[in-house]
Amino acid sequence: MLLQATHSMVLLIDVQQKLAPAIADAKQVEQAAAWVLQVALQLDIPLVATEQYPQGLGHTVPSLRELLPDDAVLQKIHFSAYREPAVVQRLKALDRQQVVVIGTESHVCVLQTVFDLLAADYQVFVVSEAVGSRTLENKQLALSRMQQAGCQIISKEMLAFEWLERADHDSFRQISKGWIR
């Protein structure tokens, strides 16, 4: 199945100030997450973010927080974001069937959220570059397990090309600038 911009929303999970430095390849994960958020904003795709126990783990890292609407960040205590009534209510209110999941940690909060979203009949897509764990082994195990459960593991470029659909899309040139290094 392909992503469709009009059916999608992005869920950023727990990329927080005190946890982020412990994540393997933290800078790359943060940059990839920022890129996904920027593309979503360019295409008017709704954003939702969570913070796991911010009193202890801090708030969303500044580079990502500045991209989020003021009301986008919801606090949680469950590892699965989809066990928090406020998150469930927000996602249902958006009335979109495709959830693009990014964030940390892949093998804990991301994985448990993905499983609950799949059980709730969402189509779930995880952007591989934009998720992370403290170890690369845990990240790989989580991606494999999520894929086996029916989640689509995708790259940033897959996400963008599927959302854009056409080379003559108004945002194609601006978004594609980020692909050329």
Image (spheres, rainbow, N blue to C red):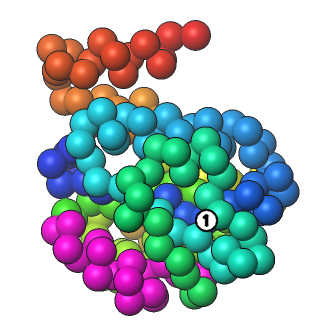
Determine whether, in the image, residue 128 is placed left or right of residue 164.
right
Q: Which residues are magenta?
A: 79-95
Count all numbered tags in the image, as a single digit. 1
The verdict on residue 90 being magenta is yes
Looking at the picture, which amino acid does disc 1 mark?
Answer: Asp
Residue at the spot 61% in from the left edge and 36% down from the top edge:
31
Q: Residue at x 30, y 33 (%)?
A: 42
Is any atom of residue 69 visible in this view? yes
- The picture places residue 119, in percent across and down from the top left corner, at 35, 82
Pointer 1 residue: 14
Which image quadrant is residue 92 in? bottom left
The quarter of the picture where the C terminus appears is top right
- Give the residue furthest to the front: 70
- Residue at 61%, 42% (x, y): give it: 63
Q: Is residue 15 left or right of residue 43?
A: right
Question: Can residue 140 be seen?
Answer: no
Q: Is 40 on the left-hand or right-hand side of 130?
A: left
Q: Main secondary structure of the magenta part?
A: helix
**Which element carries disc 1, helix, strand or loop?**
loop
Mark 1 burial class by Cα count in 10 Å: few <14, some 14-19, many 20+:
many
Q: Position of residue 126 (x, y in %)?
A: 47, 54
Q: Which x, y percent locates residue 158?
A: 38, 35
Residue located 79% across and 62% down the image? 18
Q: Is residue 10 left or right of residue 156?
A: left
Q: Is residue 127 above or below residue 133?
A: above
Against 40, residue 83 (above or below) is below
Q: Position of residue 4 (x, y in %)?
A: 20, 45
